[in-house]
Amino acid sequence: MLIKTNDMFRMNNFCFIIKSMLKKYGLILVLQFLVCFKSYSNNGYRLWLQYSYIENEQIRSNYQSTIKRIIPLGDSETINVGLKELELGLNGMLGSGFLADTENMVANSLMFGSRTSLNEDIIRQLGNAFNEINNEGFIIKTILIKGKNHIVITGKTDVGVLYGVYNFLQLLQTNKSIEKLNIIDSPKLKIRVLNHWDNLDRTVERGYAGSSIWDWHRLPDYIDQRYIDYARANASIGINGTVLNNVNANALILAPKYLEKVEALATVFRPYGIKVYLTARFSAPIEIGGLETADPYDPEVIKWWSDKTKEIYNRIPDFGGFLVKANSEGQPGPQNYDRNHVDGANMLAGALEPFGGIVMWRAFVYSEHDTTDRAKQAFSEFVPYDGQFKDNVLIQVKNGAIDFQPREPFHPMFGAMPKTPLMMEFQITQEYLGFSTHSIFLPKLFEEVLKADTYREGKGSTVAKDIDGSLHNKKLTGIAGVSNIGNAINWTGNTMLQANWYGFGRLAWNPYLTSEEIAEEWLRLTFSNNDNFVKPVKNMMLNSREAVVNYMTPLGLHHIMDTGHHYGPGPWVSNLSRPEWNPVYYHKADSLGIGFDRTPTGSHATAQYAPEVASRFNNIETCPEEYLLWFHHVPWDYKLKNGETLWDGMALKYQEGVNEVAAMINTWEDMEPYVDEERFNEVKMLLHIQYKEAKWWRDACLLYFQQFSGKELPQGVEKPTKTLDYFQSLKFPFAPGN
Ligand code: GCV
């Protein structure tokens, strides 16, 4: 049952109230109250697995007559998880005693089990379907046995069946028809992982939803119910791996004391098809192994990693592998020993190879000793190594070449390494997008990147095709999302941001889904199937990404957040030790104009794209305006496509962003009748903070840039109520996530 410890106090009170009411008012009235209560108390813990009672009688009775029995075929841990989920879901949505019954098959049974558990008649009725799915795929089909209808959920593996079970429950939750079912689906990417930037002391780097959910101190003996619900939520959207700890790694995670704890988590996650991965600190052989070097060519170092890997697999036979941040932002790596990324990654890959493990080696590198444009450095460093990595290495590449900005052009490495598996790294947590206070629907951003055309094999060579392997026939494929999860009651610190975890999982399963489909699914699962709610809130979500671009970094501006914590505007910051840590490095505003010239007259970063893309970006006339200041230093009087000058257009974009948040508030206010009080108020309060902060962004940035443009604010832009000095004086020493 999904009653949590933090709900217990409330539940005790609740039981007391119900008992008193029963005495006073009798059963019927109390039942009516309970129906109302259901929709008026919700702390968001249940995410998109609400399994709320289906109020529409026709739909509910239709489902009830189509599902009379649940029949598990098999008895594995994973099938038992599926059974529990079906019982929970069906009892919640249909409100009557659904329990497993393997003895009595009646008409309209719901059977689920892998191919090996099915009889020949069923297999025959499934026809070719098994040839159309991969090992994690599923089939949901209405079949006939002795003239009676039944539903079968199956796959090649039990995990595939479990994915089918969740998919089936989602059909009901979204009130879809379950007549004549014939659904065949498989994930398009192999590795679908969350990256937790969680530290062993339970702080979370760039985490804005409380502390880490991993209670290392009480592990391995104490298994928090959250671990199970985390696994359920991930399995329900097809996420099949989790990297438990921060890429800025602590070597201790590899010590026996911690491996015991990791093993306990792996045991919880296994039935849900979720593998555990760890980050490997490159200097671990020195720090916890007592060696004097971590040189990847040193035989003792090679042996240390190979023994360590064996030790891990002895505990966790299905361990996924290592994620590594090396020679990046001060982390140790092979370059400390005059070796390169290939040497480092292949050494670890060699240790993992006998066990089927993988290395995810990050390409997020830029050096204080390299004076070239930061945006060029990862490409320059990695692309020459194409084809040199072992088969079990993936290079993990952020969606853009700088760092998870509200908008970046796609990373030029995509499409440019035909012989090397590249996995996408998205950031689900909102380091640069207002933290968990700002309700931004990120699948819109993810979709934009996945659809971007690299032109590497001609038109249509999208980023999605590179990461799903189809562009260059790559076998190993993957995607990672930097988690936005913490121990907040609602997991993400803002119910609306659960959609970003959900949406990441859905795109990891199928990178060709649209953000609109995802928003609609999530809203129906999480809140309501009422179109009066779904339509306006879906629009609000779909516009929210453009709003944040407008009020923070319109027209291609980037990395102008305040320093360190990245909270709020800081375009004036210019005093940090490394030039590329300073916002002034990125916007380059002066009396002539603003923007970073990355064309042949500037850093020539555009040369890292395919010629078709490069020439479009190079030419100020053809460069999409949303990337204008990313690629060009543009005069303040330059005429934008709509006829406005750059200065006026930029100021109006900032205002537009603010107006968009005001519109979000209006939309949400109208939703009160459709949302439980708790979540309604939570989202409303957060939207009001977002509005305040959007105005702060607008005023601070415009006052600062106005010093260079020397121009008045155009009509339609509200006058700032504070001075630039005021904005520059703001300090946030305890901003979260640092
Ligand atoms: C985990 C950015 C963030 C860092 C993060 C780094 C990375 O620089 O500010 O907190 O470190 O990216 O992705 O490794």
Image: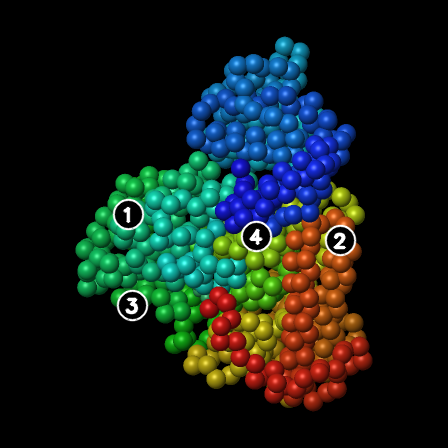
The answer to whether any part of residue 146 appears in the image is yes
Q: Which residue is mark 2?
A: 671
Q: Which residue is mark 1?
A: 309
Counting residues from the N terminus, which is met first, the one under dot 1 or under dot 3?
1
State the mark number for residue 490: 4
Q: Within 10 Å of the Cα at label 3, are there few (<14), some (14-19), or many (20+) other Cα atoms?
A: some
Q: Which residue is mark 3?
A: 336
CA–CA distance in space, label 4 to label 2: 20 Å
Counting residues from the N terminus, which is met first, the one under dot 4 or under dot 2?
4
Q: Amino acid at mark 3?
A: Asn
For this rendering, which residue is in front, 277 or 170?
170
Asked if 637 appears above or below 218 in the picture, the reply is: below
The answer to whether any part of residue 363 appears in the image is no
CA–CA distance in space, label 1 to label 3: 22 Å
Splitting the image into 4 quarters, where does residue 604 fall?
Answer: bottom right
- Residue 706 position, x and y percent, is 67, 85
Counting residues from the N terminus, which is met first, the one under dot 1 or under dot 4?
1
Q: Amino acid at mark 4?
A: Asn
Query: Which marked residue is nearer to the observer: mark 1 or mark 2?
Result: 2
Residue 641 placement, left or right of 499 = right
Look at the numbered disc 4 and give the secondary structure of its residue. Answer: loop
CA–CA distance in space, label 1 to label 2: 53 Å
